[in-house]
Image (tube, rainbow, N blue to C red):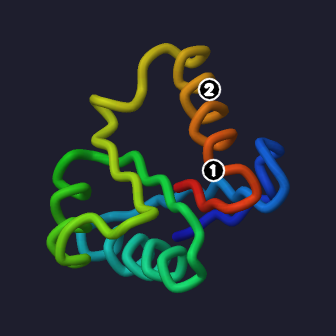
Amino acid sequence: MKFDGEASGLGNGFVHEALIYGSDQEFMDVAFPFVTEGISSDEPTLVAVQGRHVENLRAALGGIPTGVTLYAVEQWYETSARTREKVARWAAEHADRGRLA
């Protein structure tokens, strides 16, 4: 199941999506096309997910393509305030060009 939202407000054109899934395959069925669409659209793409999903995406992509940022949640999430700051900083560095997951 996928929940689509409106632009997150971090910058014009940025999107933050949430995904509820029941298996690694369900995750990949949505996440892989999301990332490859970002690559084909030349949009920087940020993904912060469980470590095994980082590895699965990296393997499926044949590495980490230019413009894609992958983080394990253990590396990315801190306190709510610090994580919001990280997202805002990443968005500012990639202003007007990005996908968030």
Mark 1 Cα-neighbour bin, 10 Å: few <14, some 14–19, many ≥20:
some
* In the image: residue 89, left or right of residue 33: right
- 62 w.r.t. 4: above or below: below
**Which secondary structure lies at badge 1?**
loop
Q: Residue at x 41, y 61 (%)?
A: 68
Place of residue 60 in the rendered image (x, y in percent of width and height, measured from the top left):
21, 78
Labels 1 and 2: the sequence-earlier one? 2
Mark 2 Cα-neighbour bin, 10 Å: few <14, some 14–19, many ≥20:
some
Place of residue 48 in the rendered image (x, y in percent of width and height, measured from the top left):
40, 46
* In the image: residue 36, left or right of residue 17: left
Place of residue 34 in the rendered image (x, y in percent of width and height, measured from the top left):
50, 75
- 42 w.r.t. 57: above or below: below
Question: Which residue is the site of mark 1?
Answer: 94
Q: Residue at x 30, y 30 (%)?
A: 75
* In the image: residue 49, left or right of residue 36: left
Q: Amino acid at mark 1?
A: His
Q: Amino acid at mark 2?
A: Arg
**Which secondary structure lies at badge 2?**
helix
**Residue 84 got which mark?**
2
- Quadrant of residue 74 within the rendered picture: top left
Mark 1 vs mark 2: give the one in front: 1
- Quadrant of residue 85 within the rendered picture: top right
Q: Residue at x 59, y 69 (%)?
A: 43
Given residues 34 and 69, the one toward you in this image is: 69
Q: Answer yes or no: do the residues labelled 1 and 2 have beta carbons within 8 Å? A: no
Q: Residue at x 34, y 74 (%)?
A: 26
**Residue 3 got which mark?**
none
* In the image: residue 70, left or right of residue 91: left
